[in-house]
Image (cartoon, rainbow, N blue to C red):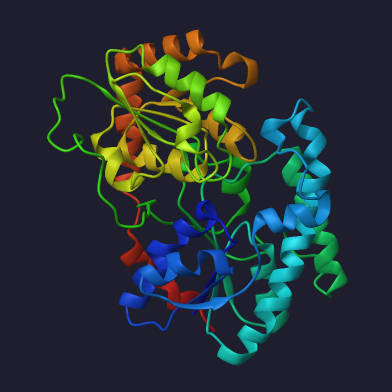
Amino acid sequence: MIFTSLVSHGHLYPLLPLAVAARDAGHEVVFATGEDMLAVVEKAGLAVEIAGFGMREAFESIAGPDAPKPNASDAPPESFNPVIGEVFGNVLPRRFVADLTPLLERHRPDLVVYESGNAGGAIAAHLAGIPAIGHGFGRFSPGDVMDVIYGRVAEFATEVGLGGLKLPSFGDPVVDICPESVQAPDFLATATRIPLRPVGWAEPGDLPAGVVGRDKSRPLVYLTLGTAFGDEDVLKRAIGALARLDADVIVAAGPTVDPASLGEVPGNVRVESWVPQVELLPHVDLVVHHGGSGTTMGAFGAGLPQLVLPQGADQFTNAEAVVAAGVGAQLIGAEAVEDVIFEQARKLLADEAVRGAARRLADEVAAMPSPAEVAQRLPEFAG
């Protein structure tokens, strides 16, 4: 079997539990992704092949190295849709098809498991005549930008002789890690869905001092803007707000923000470059985050209230889903000022209705099939 994902933590991590479970079930598994992520895959004990390149390189090939990020620009987010559509609907798929085609010819796998954002993985498998299934990385998010991406994917697919592929699933079954109650209705109505519990994945590491065995009468708040959309100003505002709570705060600055740039922080706040999120969440009382799929799914599974500060991509529709499920609140753009963040966080920590909804959602996640159970089903889809 070949698993393949875009070159991003948020797109790759969700596939690792099933890939590892498939290997443990006795299948030969090779994971194909870009060079920047190979070390992560190797730490999971999987064989690797190089395919694709990173999103930053892809964006720079279109917009140049100095182009602003959508969350760091005064331009409306929708003005970036043509560039985003070109990157995810043409540049990345084209590169993955070029790299995966010889790999598929050499390995001749019985099944390709492609991450759903990696259209090139799907197209390469279909061109090679190899059975394939998609693997979601969170909620399937409808919207204008996705329409642009799918339009460009359809054009590329037609160019290579695969016109008429049914998007977004390419006509393939899809491993879905999102609880059904919060999944997009359009996806549920049209997809052949293989439910899989979102168990999360993190590189091994120690929790910050004081987390284990802490005084649980004092809440612990976790703040992160993820690995791709970190924003120094947003983090500073959020730190200032959360420090005013009668709570302890752990901040994961992520790879895009230097912790030193955040300056001196109050005594109840601890800033780390990185934390093992999967291990941290069971100790947390509230997650304040960007709405990335990994953090959203992790908070669902841990039964935690969420305050979402979306910055880009699918984070806005994830935030809407959090609110619709009754498990949190969202603050968008100019709404995310210190006083409002403080007030919303304070309310969420005290809201028993939100906590009850979060616990029910966690129960739904716990009832979903495990990676080991889904791995046992994979031969059903293989050639």
Q: Which residue is located at x 57 percent, y 25 percent?
A: 233
How many labels, in total?
0
Give the answer, above or below, for where 225 lies relative to 43. Answer: above
**Depth order, front residue of 315/110:** 315
Relative vertical location of residue 291 with respect to residue 194 in this rendering, above or below: above
Instruction: Decide if residue 21 is on the left or right side of residue 156.
Output: left
Up-down relation of residue 236 to residue 343 (above or below): below
Is residue 208 among the parts visible in the rendering?
Answer: yes
Image location (x, y in percent) of residue 26? 33, 82
Q: Residue furthest bottom?
A: 106
Q: Nearer the viewer, residue 266 or 53?
A: 266
Please give the name of the residue rendered at 72% of the width and 74% of the height, measured from the top-left corner: 97
- Dividing the picture into quadrants, the one containing residue 310 is top right
Quarter of the view holding residue 219: top left
Image quadrant assignment for residue 209: top left
Q: Position of residue 360 (x, y in %)?
A: 32, 32
Residue 376 visible in the snapshot: no
Quarter of the figure with the C terminus: bottom right
**x 62%, y 84%: residue:** 104
Is 124 placed left or right of 268 in the picture? right
Where's residue 237, x and y in %? 51, 19
Near-viewer residue (326 or 305): 305
- Residue 335 screen position, x and y as percent: 59, 14
**Is residue 107 positioned above or below 70 on the image?**
below
